[in-house]
């Protein structure tokens, strides 16, 4: 009998990470739209780091940021919260690696919006906050859907950074990619194949669902 | 257009091949430091050769060889991975040999003074213990043997975090995110921020031997033999010892003492 806990963990992690990265990506892209300063291009480059760096390095950085030796880690542990080797750590890792995909796609989409449309909304007295959710996102929904699919898939496949900061603890932080990796390494190929097939069918389902929604 | 691009590249490749014979060695990552030292020495004696190392976990390296990776020598940290290749006829049986041994130690951070012995592992001061993944990482397999024979396995199981290699265990302990871990003595010696609390009794786990063999039908088997002879020489064995490894010779003298 195959253990399906990694699957639930993965779905939970990827969904949470996609939701967080969506909000962060949209807000950052909107903020970035307003400021066209050249120097901010450097910031765009920095925001792409998680895509370019090996995931293990990102995991190591996160370990340094949230670990017991850092000020953040110390502050959290003084209120009884330990991030490392917990499920939130997996969500953080997935959010960080998916952020560049979300941000870049959303920003490109926002740049395509006719600025006059936003001014019209302003004339009608819409708040900037409301314009984002009621005007901008619906206007480029197809790109949004693409950004969500890309981020969800990347989160689902996330391995390196997650293994580093969330660890490989069966039932707690062992997501599907981690389970597959250790199954392959242990020579338990049938387990790896089944989990891979499940991931593949989820991918197909998600793409199908999103194409229905963006029609 | 494509041929225009590839021709210069091919020429470069051919020219460099003609100049040096290249030997590709897939070796367990724990052997990295001494092997690089030995490679430097080897290069001084045989300047017209080039050693290319592919370091990784013994299991991953075995998978690559099983799938036809162009490798000349396999150096494994686990007997079962080598056995698999021997049984499949993928390595030359005659060249198969064990030359080195390692040992397992319990480590903690330099500044940690709450852990002094194995018995402390079950205490409250220890939240997590890092070990190699039991089924796929040799250093984890040996730790499992030990924990089982000390009857600590079931007690400690909720505290275990399974790493994919020894380096990950050391990173966790160095960064104080995990209080204790089981690693090879050779890896523990490399880090200045960790200390060895206790050596694991070798009788509690299966022997930790390193094995090497030449890959079947290697086009460079002659050079591979030369290299393996070089590895067995005293000067190379001295380099292994410097990095904390036990050589077969030292092992036999230990047993007779």
Image: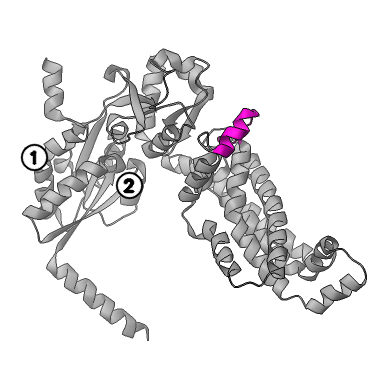
Instruction: Please identify the quarter of the rendering in which residue A111 is found.
Output: bottom right
**Residue furthest right in the image:** A124
x then y, percent, for residue A67: 53, 37
Residue B223 vs B152, above or below: the answer is below
Nearer to us in this view, A194 or A54? A54
Asked if residue A154 shows in the view, the reply is no
Disc on the earlier residue, 2 or 1: 2
x then y, percent, for residue A109: 70, 71
Mark 2: secondary structure: helix
Which residues are drawn in magenta? A71-86
Nearer to us in this view, B198 or A175? B198
Instruction: Please identify the quarter of the rendering in which residue A114 is found.
Output: bottom right
Q: Is residue A207 magenta?
A: no
Which mark, residue B235? 1
Which mark, residue B61? 2
Give the side of residue B48 with respect to residue A197, left or right. left
Mark 1: secondary structure: helix
Nearer to us in this view, B223 or B123? B123
Q: Are marks 2 and 1 on the same chain?
A: yes
């Amino acid at each position: 009998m195959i253990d399906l806990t990694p699957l639930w963990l993965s779905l939970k992690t990827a969904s949470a990470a996609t939701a967080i990265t969506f909000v962060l990506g949209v807000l950052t892209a909107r903020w970035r739209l307003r400021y066209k300063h050249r120097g901010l291009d450097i910031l765009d480059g920095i925001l792409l780091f998680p895509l370019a760096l090996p995931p293990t390095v990102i995991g190591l950085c996160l370990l340094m940021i949230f670990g017991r030796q850092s000020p953040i880690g110390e502050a959290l542990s003084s209120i009884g919260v330990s991030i490392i080797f917990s499920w939130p750590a997996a969500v953080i890792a997935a959010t960080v690696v998916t952020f560049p995909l979300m941000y870049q796609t959303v920003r490109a989409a926002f740049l395509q919006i006719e600025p006059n449309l936003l001014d019209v909304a302003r004339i009608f007295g819409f708040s900037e906050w409301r314009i984002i959710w009621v005007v901008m996102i619906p206007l480029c929904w197809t790109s949004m859907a693409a950004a969500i699919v890309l981020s969800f898939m990347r989160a689902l496949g996330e391995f390196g950074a997650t293994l580093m900061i969330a660890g490989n603890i069966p039932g707690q932080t062992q997501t599907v990619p981690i389970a597959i990796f250790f199954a392959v390494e242990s020579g338990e190929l049938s387990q790896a194949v089944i989990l891979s097939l499940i991931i593949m069918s989820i991918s197909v389902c998600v793409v199908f669902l999103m194409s229905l929604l963006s029609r | 257009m494509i041929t225009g691009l590839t021709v210069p590249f091919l020429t470069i490749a051919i020219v460099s091949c003609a100049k040096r014979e290249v030997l590709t060695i897939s070796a367990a990552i724990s052997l990295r430091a001494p092997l690089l030292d030995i490679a430097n020495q080897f290069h001084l004696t045989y300047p017209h050769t080039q050693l290319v190392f592919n370091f990784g976990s013994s299991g991953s390296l075995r998978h690559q060889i099983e799938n036809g990776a162009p490798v000349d020598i396999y150096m494994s940290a686990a007997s079962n991975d080598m056995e698999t290749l021997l049984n499949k006829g993928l390595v030359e049986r005659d060249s198969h040999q064990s030359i080195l041994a390692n040992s397992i130690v319990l480590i903690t951070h330099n500044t940690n003074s709450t852990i002094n012995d194995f018995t402390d592992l079950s205490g409250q001061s220890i939240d997590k213990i890092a070990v190699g993944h039991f089924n796929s990482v040799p250093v984890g397999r040996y730790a499992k043997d030990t924990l089982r024979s000390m009857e600590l396995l079931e007690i400690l199981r909720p505290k275990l975090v399974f790493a994919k290699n020894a380096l990950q265990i050391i990173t966790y302990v160095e960064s104080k995110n995990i209080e204790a871990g089981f690693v090879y003595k050779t890896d523990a010696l490399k880090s200045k921020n960790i200390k060895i609390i206790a050596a694991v009794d070798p009788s509690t786990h299966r022997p930790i031997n390193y094995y090497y063999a030449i890959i079947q039908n290697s086009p460079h088997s002659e050079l591979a033999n030369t290299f393996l002879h070089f590895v067995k020489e005293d000067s190379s064995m001295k380099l292994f010892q410097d990095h904390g490894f036990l050589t077969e010779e030292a092992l036999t003298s230990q047993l007779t003492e």
